[in-house]
Image: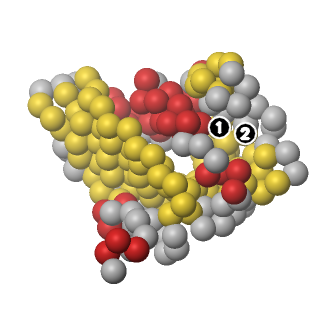
């Protein structure tokens, strides 16, 4: 019965098996002379500490992360420099860490699903659990995102970023979409 069918993420997102509990998306347009310029910003995790978002929980502007950077693998032993556009090659996987304002560290994986001169598709998922206070809010792979950037015209680009909260997420993670939307907007502004 279609009326009883559960919502499912679009196949193009390729989110891992399981039920998506909540999803959000943001679409917009960007101006840049090339995709390389946009990928330079995307790969500059060292600058992510300068991004601010509106915290619904604290009713205040907060830092997106207190620190972020690329690492050599899921075990995160060595930090690497920011990614340059030439590193965004179809099929490549990279790992990065984020440290939130409460000094909690998580490791994520970025997969370059596709790249041409006019388009890029980037997927991320958490590799380690993400906690808040004493609770694990996201088990590994429970928080996933896909970003699509595609040429719209000369120096114009379509931007679409989706975020999915899936199986292995605590009930607190799906209380409201506002925190996710605010973070998507902050990344888009950046």
The local crowd at label 1, few if under 14, some if 14 to 19, many if 20 or more residues have their Cα within 10 Å, is many
**Position of residue 89 in the picture relative to residue 137 (left or right):** left
Q: Which residue, given by chain and number where applicable, does mark 1 sit on?
A: 68
Q: Earlier in the sequence, mark 1 or mark 2?
A: 1
Colouring: secondary structure
Q: Which residue, given by chain and number where applicable, does mark 2 sit on?
A: 99
- Residue 5 percent location from the top left of the image: 39, 74
Q: From this view, report whether residue 168 is shown above or below residue 103.
A: below
Q: Are marks 1 and 2 in contact (CB under 8 Å)?
A: yes
Residue shown at 40% from the left, 44% from the top: 25
- Residue 57 percent location from the top left of the image: 70, 31
Q: From this view, report whether residue 161 is shown above or below residue 45.
A: below
Instruction: Give 168 or 67, whichever is nearer the viewer.
Output: 168
Residue shown at 30% from the left, 32% from the top: 28
- Residue 12 percent location from the top left of the image: 31, 63
Secondary structure state at the residue bearing disc 1? strand
Q: CA distance from mark 1 to mark 2?
A: 6 Å
């Amino acid at each position: 019965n279609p009326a009883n069918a559960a919502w499912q993420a679009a196949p193009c997102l390729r989110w891992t098996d399981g039920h998506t509990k909540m999803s959000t998306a943001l679409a917009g347009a960007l101006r840049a002379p090339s995709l390389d310029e946009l990928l330079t910003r995307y790969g500059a995790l060292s600058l992510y500490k300068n991004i601010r978002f509106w915290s619904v929980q604290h009713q205040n502007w907060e830092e997106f992360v207190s620190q972020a950077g690329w690492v050599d693998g899921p075990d995160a032993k060595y930090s690497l420099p920011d990614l340059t556009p030439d590193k965004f090659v179809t099929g490549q996987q990279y790992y990065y860490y984020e440290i939130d304002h409460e000094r909690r560290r998580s490791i994520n994986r970025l997969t370059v699903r596709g790249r041409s001169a006019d388009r890029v598709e980037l997927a991320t998922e958490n590799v380690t659990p993400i906690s808040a206070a004493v609770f694990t809010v996201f088990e590994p792979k429970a928080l996933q995102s896909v970003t699509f950037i595609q040429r719209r015209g000369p120096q114009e680009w379509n931007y679409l970023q989706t975020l999915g909260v899936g199986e292995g997420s605590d009930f607190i993670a799906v209380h409201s979409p506002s925190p996710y939307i605010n973070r998507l907007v902050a990344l888009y502004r950046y």
